[in-house]
Amino acid sequence: MRRIRPFLGRLYRAVLRPVGRVALDLVGIVPALIAGAGVFLIAAGLFYYLSPGTLAPSPAPTAAPSSSVAVYSIPPIATAAPPGPSASSVASIATRVTIPALSIDLPVVTSPPNEQFPLCNAAEYLVLDKPLAYPGLPQSTYLYAHARTNMFLPLLTQSMVKNGAAMIGMWVEVYTNDDQRHIYQISQVLRHVSGSAALSTADAATTDQLWLQTSEGPFESSTKLQVVAQPVGVIAASQADAHPAGKGNVCPDAPRCKAPGNTGCRP
C-alpha cells in the first residue's frame, strides 16, 4: 500500500490534474463559442438582407402602405409603366429628398402654375411634357431648389472643391407617396451648365435616373449645377417619413410678381 500511494500521487500530478484543467478550459470556451456563433449569424443575416447583389428584384411597389422593411433590390424598371400622360395614375410621385452626408432634407412639391421664382424650404420637380417626378420609371426624376441655407447650398459648395469629386458615391434618398424610399448614388457632377443643355439630356433619359439642380448665381440667366445619380435599390418607408409636413413657401426676398396669376413671387 505504501508503494501504491506515491504512485497514485505521481499519476494524479502527471495525468489526471492536467486533463482536468483542459476539461475545465473547454467548458469555459463553449459559452464563448456559442456567443461568437450568434454574433456571426446575426451579422450574416444583416448582410443578406442589406446586400443589393445577392437578392432577386422585389415586386413593383403598390400604393398600399407597408409596415415591413423591404430588402434592397434593383428597382423594377423593366416592368414599370412607360412614361406618359397616364403615368400619374400608375406610378408613385416624389415627396421628399435627402442627402444624409450633406444634411439636406427637403419636401418635394410640384412647381406651381405660372411660377416666376422657385419656392423656399422645398425642392420642386420639373414638369416638361410630363412630370419628371416618378422614381423607378424609365425616365429621369428632376428636382431643383435654391442654393440657399437648408436647401441645395451644400451641393453648390461641394461642387467648388475639385469639381465636386467628394460627392461622387454619396447616397441620395427620394421618398414617394406610396411609402417607399428610392436610394440613388451620385455618379456625375456637371458644373456651369447653360441654355437648353440644362434640360435636354435629362428629358431624353430612358432609364431611371435622378437629377438635382441648383443655380450657380443669383440671376435667372446664371449657369446651373446638375448632380446626376443612379438607382441602387428601394426599401419601405414609414408614412410619416414619406409625407413631410412642409410644402415650401414664397421666399421673403422673392421678386415682385410681373403679371397677375404668377406664383413664387411677392404680390
Image (cartoon, rainbow, N blue to C red):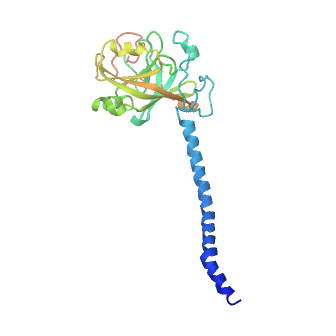
Q: From this viewpoint, which residue is outermost toward the right?
A: 1
Query: Residue 93's x, y, as percent?
Result: 52, 20
Residue in the image at 57% along x and 37% along y: 49
Query: Residue 38's x, y, as percent?
Result: 60, 50
Image vertical order of residue 67 relative to residue 198, above or below: below
Question: Image quarter for residue 91?
Answer: top right
**Left or right of 93 on screen, residue 267:** left
Query: Residue 83's x, y, as percent?
Result: 51, 12
Q: In which quadrant will I find the C terminus? A: top left
Residue in the image at 34% along x and 34% along y: 166
**Left or right of 37 on screen, residue 246:** left
Q: From this viewpoint, which residue is outermost toward the front?
A: 3
Query: Residue 108's x, y, as percent?
Result: 47, 24
In this view of the protein, can residue 102 be seen by the observer? yes
Q: In which quadrant will I find the N terminus? A: bottom right
Towards the viewer: 233 or 129: 233
Question: Image quarter for residue 127?
Answer: top left
Image vertical order of residue 34 relative to residue 59, above or below: below
Towards the viewer: 197 or 246: 197
Q: From this viewpoint, which residue is outermost toward the bottom?
A: 2
**Left or right of 52 on screen, residue 165:** left
In this view of the protein, can residue 160 be seen by the observer? no
